[in-house]
Every structure is written in C-alpha cells, then in structure tokens.
Image: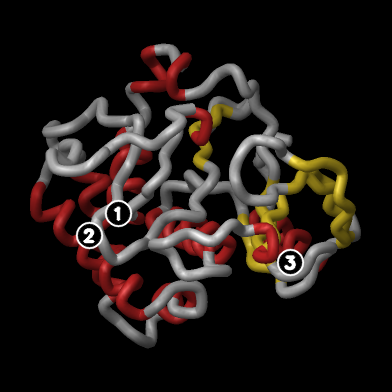
Amino acid sequence: MSYSGDLKSTLAALQKGEIDLTGLFEAGSNDTFLVTLRHPGFEARAVYKPERGEQPLWDFPEGTLSRREVAAFLVSQALGWELVPPTVYRRSGPLGRGSLQLYIDHDPEYHYFSFRPEHRARLQPVVAFDAVINNADRKGGHVLVDADDHIWLIDHGVCFHEDDKLRTVIWDFAGQPLPADLASDLQRLAQQLTQPDAKLTRMLTKLLTVPEVQALANRARRLVEAGVFPFPHPDRRPYPWPPV
C-alpha cells in the first residue's frame, strides 16, 4: 500500500495487530520478514525485524538495531518530514521482540540511482536527515517513491552512533546552503532534545542511550550552525557497500 491513512490508527494496528509471516527478504545480513498485519478494520503488509535475527556488529550494541529503526521514525515525525514509514517496537511477535514497519508499495527498480532529476532535486531533507541520525548505511535502494509520489526511507538499524559514521550514496548537495525551513526544523529538534522531560527525549531514551540522544542533538545543532550540507569525510570511507 502507499501510506495515506490515519497515523494513529496505523500505529495502533502495528502495535496490537496480529502478525502472520508471509516471506523472508533474502537480501541483507539480518533476518527481515514480510508479514501480513491484521487488526479490526485494518489489513496491510508490514516489515518485521526480530532482534533474534540481528547479526552482531563490532561497533553497535547487540540487540539494538530494531530499536534504532523506531528511533528513526520518531525523529522523522518530530522534524515534520514524514520520511520514515510508521514503525513501532513490538515486545512480542512470531519470533520475539523487534521492530514492525508498514510496508510501502514501490517499484524496486526505481531508486536513487535511477531517479529522474525531479526526484533527485527533492532529496535535501533526506541528506539532512541522514546527517543528523548519523546513518552508516544509506544505500540507493533504501530510498523509495510510492504511488502518491512520496519519498520514503527504510533500513535505519545502523544509525545514531555517538561517533561519526555517516556513509551514504547521496552527496549531491555537499557544500550547498541548508534551506532555511530545514534549518528551522532541525533547530527545533535540537531544542526538544535538550529538555530531559520532553516527550520526544523520553521516548528516544527508551530506544537509545542517553549519550546517543545527546549526540543526536549536537549533530542537529552543528548542521544548523554550519549552514551547509556536509562533505564526504576525507579520512574514512563515506560510502556504504554495496551501494544499492
């Protein structure tokens, strides 16, 4: 489906609905399942990533990738950019706890590397978002366009690290001015995250460590202060592999 429904009811269905496994995505190192989600008055496909299917990484704490998927959704919503499909953390599922994200119907052959110029021109929020959440794995195939011409981002399990790990294929705007509306949204995000009792801060600290949330606020603030989109890091690999 292309997401155009009521967010509150969609999140309720994701959190409380019945999950039936229907398939396994073969690409990727972590177990990722396509499921059918059923809730009264609601039926849709979703993507289920159980914690038990995560492969250990040397630089990310074990069993935290699904929580980072949810954190990316919360940040996207807080910014008002609606880049990440509705995502929740389920404490129970067919294979145990993990993230559940609404599946977005899209053409898998149409992604960043095949985008027409009009879609590439709309990627400034994507670049700013990845810089702020410190996305270590923005592949071209993680950027989708649905039937309503909305751009969506998926796969955020390796984000929010305290150390700079930005790896992305999208460097189109490096050095260009950060638009004022994006800067305003990022400034608002940073201000929220400096308030320990703010709802967003409390929600994120259930998914990330306190230092990771503080680093998120600092990256948002630094990007606004810089006023331009970042350049690739000169001393380490700035691209993911594989790129798609």
Tell me: 3 left or right of 162.
right
Q: Position of residue 219 (x, y in %)?
A: 22, 59
Q: Nearer the viewer, mark 3 or mark 1?
A: 1
Tell me: 116 left or right of 67.
left
Q: Point out the image quarter for the N terminus.
A: top right
Q: Amino acid at mark 3?
A: Gln
Q: Residue at x 59, y 47 (%)?
A: 85
Residue in the foreground of this view, choosing between 35 and 225: 35
Q: Is residue 123 visible?
A: yes
Q: Are marks 2 and 1 in contact (CB under 8 Å)?
A: yes
Q: Position of residue 195 (x, y in %)?
A: 30, 82
Disc 3 target residue: 15
Q: Residue at x 32, y 53 (%)?
A: 134
Q: Hey, which quadrant is residue 90 in on the image? A: bottom right
Q: Hey, which quadrant is residue 116 in on the image? A: top left
Q: Amino acid at mark 1?
A: Val
Which of the two labelled residues, at mark 3 and mark 1, occupies the earlier sequence position?
3
Disc 1 target residue: 132
What is the secondary structure assignment of the residue under circle 2?
helix
Q: Position of residue 63 (x, y in %)?
A: 57, 69
Q: What mark, if any, has residue 219 been given in the picture?
A: 2
Which of the two labelled residues, at mark 3 and mark 2, occupies the earlier sequence position?
3
Q: Nearer the viewer, mark 3 or mark 2?
A: 2
Tell me: 215 left or right of 16.
left
Residue in the foreground of this view, choosing between 3 and 130: 130
Q: Is residue 151 visible?
A: no
Q: Is residue 86 above or below residue 178?
A: below
Furthest-left residue in view? 226
Q: Position of residue 24 (x, y in %)?
A: 77, 42
